[in-house]
Image: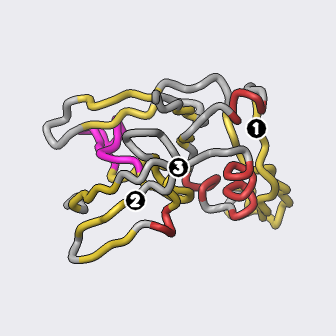
Amino acid sequence: MERKWLNLTPHSVVILDNNGEVIKEFLPSGGTIRLAAKRGLLGHLDGVPILREELGSPVLEGLPEEELEKAHYVIVSSVVASSEEAVKWLLSKGIIGILVPTDFVRDKEGKIIGAKALKLEAGGISCPYCGHGIKKEAVEVEDEKTSFFCNNCGLSWTEIEVVCE
């Protein structure tokens, strides 16, 4: 079963190995998700406006919800992933995993050029055999090894947890 990824950020997400080689590039999916914001001016500091901001509901732009409902995994910003309301909304659309880039790689000028991994913020993973969603809460971790079991097809497997240094 082919996994359907959606990159709901406005830019490419490039995953690099330890040698700086591209493992995978996720191009923008044509739509973005952000949080609605209410802003109010608090004042000025040395002529610079200082705002107060309250983040609100998730807003999907440029992508029909039907396309979102076909996805298995979505890549979002850490701000979106930190919103309980956005996470619940995405999971209600059938998303298996909500992911954010992590362990960033920078060029000599300090500009981010990629990430070494995607971090699972919410949801779970899917069975490599049948594609059925495996919820994060059902995964067992013991002695730095992660065991998975698919309730759909019965496949079980173990992966060694890798920690980036």
Mark pair 2, 1: CA separation? 33 Å
Q: Using a 10 Å C-alpha cutoff, classify the residue at mark 2 as few (fewer than 14 neighbours), some (14 to 19) or many (20 or more).
A: some
Q: What is the three-letter code of the residue carrying label 3?
A: Gly
Secondary structure category for the residue under label 3? strand
The answer to whether 42 appears left or right of 47 in the picture is right
Q: How many marks?
A: 3
Looking at the image, residue 135 lies above or below residue 96: below
Q: What is the three-letter code of the residue carrying label 1?
A: Leu
Identity of the residue drawn at 75% across and 60% down: 85
Residue under circle 1?
60
| The image quarter in which residue 110 lies | top left
Residue under circle 3?
133
Q: Which residues are magenta?
A: 104-118
**Disc nearest the viewer among 2 and 1:** 2
Identity of the residue drawn at 81% across and 58% down: 56
Q: What is the three-letter code of the residue carrying label 2?
A: Phe
Secondary structure category for the residue under label 2? strand
Residue 111: where, in percent of width, then height?
A: 36, 39
Mark pair 3, 2: CA separation? 10 Å
Q: Are marks 1 and 3 in contact (CB under 8 Å)?
A: no
Circle on res. 43: none
Q: Using a 10 Å C-alpha cutoff, classify the residue at mark 1 as few (fewer than 14 neighbours), some (14 to 19) or many (20 or more).
A: some
Mark 3 or mark 1, which is nearer the start of the sequence?
1
Residue under circle 2?
149
The answer to whether 149 appears left or right of 61 in the picture is left
Identity of the residue drawn at 26% across and 29% down: 22
Residue 128: where, in percent of width, then height?
A: 37, 41
Residue furthest left in the image: 19
Residue situated in front as seen by the camera: 52 or 98: 98
Q: Using a 10 Å C-alpha cutoff, classify the residue at mark 3 as few (fewer than 14 neighbours), some (14 to 19) or many (20 or more).
A: many
Residue 159: where, in percent of width, then height?
A: 25, 57
